Amino acid sequence: MTRRPVDLGSPHRLYTVTGGRSHADGKAFDLVTLVVAESVATSGMQSEHARILQICARPTAMVEISAELGLPVTVVRILLEDLLDMGHITARHPQLARSTGSLPDSALLTEVLHGLRNL
């Protein structure tokens, strides 16, 4: 299967989508930040914002959102910051989950891996 290059549209479209901004102000989002929608799209909302809320009905990594929208990561980061500022999404880095003890430790995962190999 041959992959077609993503059509990013004209630079004018990207300029319009981001409101003329070329970079995000905060550092809340990196490629693996998990994003979850806290609301549904509202009437008059920018179509890209609405699509992000739809995609993030379940926890979704920022890089997945970028791929789904077919937009550069830098543009998606700006859009996500807009939604975060408006309270429409929450964001959590996977390392935060690890520090709360909700993920198994590496020793347990190693034991599981060895057990699976022995099957």
Image (spheres, grey):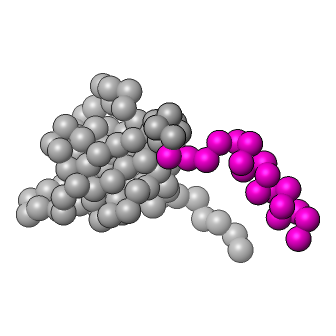
Picture residue at 40% right of the left edge, 56% below the top = 59
The quarter of the image holding the N terminus is: bottom right
Residue 29 visible in image: yes
> Magenta includes 105?
yes
Left or right position of 116 against 11: right
Using the rendered image of the protein, determine whether residue 75 is visible from the camera's viewpoint.
no
Q: In which quarter of the image is residue 70?
A: bottom left
Relative to 99, say whether 62 is above or below.
below
Towards the viewer: 105 or 91: 105
Q: Left or right: 10 with respect to 100? A: left
User: What range is drawn magenta here?
Assistant: 102-119
Question: Could you tell me residue 63's position as x and y percent?
Answer: 50, 48
Residue at figure coordinates x 26%, y 49% from the top left: 89
Say above or below: 20 vs 89.
Answer: above
Q: Please give the name of the residue rendered at 50% of the width and 46% of the height, measured from the top-left corner.
A: 102
Q: Residue furthest left?
A: 43
Check residue 24 for magenta coloring. no
Furthest toward the bottom, the residue is: 1
> Is 77 or 11 nearer to us in this picture?
77
Q: Is the magenta stretch mostly helix, strand or loop?
A: helix
